[in-house]
Image (spheres, rainbow, N blue to C red):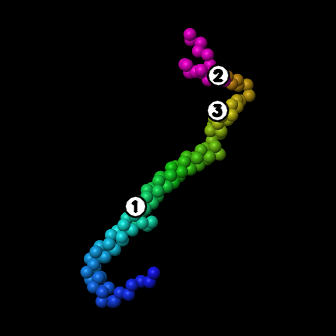
Amino acid sequence: MPLPNISPSVAAAYLRRNARQILVLGLFALLLHDVFGTHGFIAMRRTQKEIEQIRDQISKINDENKSLSGQVNSLKTDPKAIERIAREEMGLARPGELIYKLPDSAKPGDPQKPDLQK
């Protein structure tokens, strides 16, 4: 379907008559794009929140790294720390020592172990 032939004077008159509406519509489209576009205000706020969350995670990981490096340093230099871990986690003892392991106490109403208080 061919486009109708419009004379330049008719087009200019139409633009003069509707210039304000066209300008308002264009500004409204730009405003929508600035707020809701891919790089708009809402996307920028979402990105800033993600950056804050990642910075918090980095801070927590840095604190954990400091703690772990302190533990590594104590394990390299402190024999008492090594002995404590050997006793608590590995169940080791010095020659001549006896280790007594007691069973975990049953909680009242535990279905797997009979309740002896009845």
Question: Disc 2 marks which amino acid?
Answer: Leu
Look at the numbered disc 2 and give the secondary structure of its residue.
loop
Q: To which quarter of the image does residue 12 belong? A: bottom left
Residue under pointer 1 = 42
Q: Give the range drawn in magenta.
A: 101-118
Residue 73's tag is none
> Which dot, 2 or 3, sits closer to the camera?
2
Tell which circle, 2 or 3, labels the residue nearer the N-terminal end. 3
Tell which circle, 3 or 1, labels the residue nearer the N-terminal end. 1
Residue under pointer 3 = 88
Look at the numbered disc 3 and give the secondary structure of its residue.
helix
- Position of residue 108 relative to residue 10, above or below, is above
Residue 113 magenta: yes
Q: Position of residue 13 (x, y in %)?
A: 27, 85
Question: Disc 1 marks which amino acid?
Answer: Ile
Q: Residue at x 47, y 53 (%)?
A: 53
Residue 102's tag is 2
Question: Disc 3 marks which amino acid?
Answer: Glu
